[in-house]
Amino acid sequence: MNTENERKILVAGCDRDFCASIYRALTLRGLAADVVFDGVQAIRAFSASDYDIAIIDADITRVAACEVADKFRSLSGGKVLALLNDCTEISKAVNDLKCDAALTRPFTRKRFYEVIDGLL
């Protein structure tokens, strides 16, 4: 895990525009972030670098989100924030992903920051 001044977050999702929005929100908050666009890239990223939080889109491609979350936890011990679409059942997603928090789209930047602050 990184020190408080070095918090680093990995954003993993297949919607490039949405990931860019999440990235901007994190960097505006002064947090370091990297973005990847599928499960294989996510596993490579957190195998190579230390992240405090993985923000994983439940619809991520190439490797299932639950596998990405499990691999992240085994490598880093960090926390997982699941991003769900509006028709995903939250309790099932939370159980499947074993995530620490979940947000269903759409959500406000204020709510996003509240969740991130709670995970840090």
Image: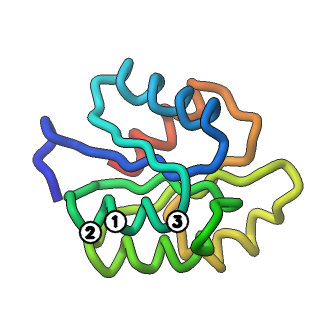
| Marking on residue 20 | none
Three-letter amino acid code of the residue under disc 1: Arg
The x and y percentages for residue 5 are 13, 35
Q: Amino acid at mark 2?
A: Ser
Q: Residue at x 32, y 47 (%)?
A: 120
Residue placed under numbered mark 3 in the picture: 39
Q: Which residue is mark 1?
A: 44
Whether residues under marks 1 and 2 lie with C-beta atoms below 8 angstroms apart, the answer is yes
- Locate residue 85, reporting x and y percent: 78, 50
Q: Residue furthest right?
A: 87
C-alpha gap between disc 1 and disc 2: 5 Å
Provide residue 83's location: percent of width, then percent of height: 64, 51
Which of the two discs, 1 and 3, labels the residue nearer the N terminus? Answer: 3
Q: Would you identify the image quadrant in which residue 59 lies?
A: bottom right
Q: What amino acid type is highlighted by mark number 3?
A: Gly
From this view, report whether residue 117 is shown above or below residue 38: above
